[in-house]
Image (spheres, helix red, strand yellow):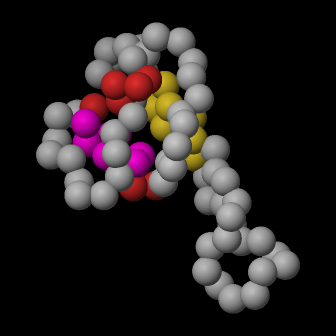
Amino acid sequence: LHEDDLLIITADHGNDPTAEGTDHTREYIPVLMYSPKFNGGQALEGDTTFSSIGATIADNFGVTLPDYGRSYLEALK
């Protein structure tokens, strides 16, 4: 990978089969992020949502950050 590349692997969490309805439930999802500029592995604390993935991508490539989500780029360096 190049210095400014960002690899993200994640998954859909599905729904709790015991919950009624079709809304998403409490399941967590894995989010693995890698870049050559990151310094070791870390766990991200706090509320992490799919919108945070978008904000991190935007921040990595110097694009205007979206209104939702927060970038984890600095926390991962």
Residue 24 in the magenta stretch? The answer is no
Q: Residue at x 62, y 73 (%)?
A: 24
Whether residue 16 appears in this view of the structure is yes
Q: Residue at x 59, y 29 (%)?
A: 43
- Residue 5 visible, this angle: no
In depth, the one of 5 and 75 nearer the eye is: 75
Left or right of 40? Residue 56 is left
Q: Position of residue 31 (x, y in %)?
A: 57, 41
Per the rendered image, the range of residues in magenta is: 52-59
Q: How far across and how far down the image is residue 71, in percent?
A: 34, 39
Which quarter of the figure has residue 15? bottom right
Horizontal relation, residue 61 to residue 31: left or right:
left
Is 11 rendered above or below residue 23?
above
Which residue is at 49% across, 25% downward?
34
Query: Is residue 56 covered in magenta?
Result: yes
Where does residue 11 sit, x and y in percent of width and height?
61, 52
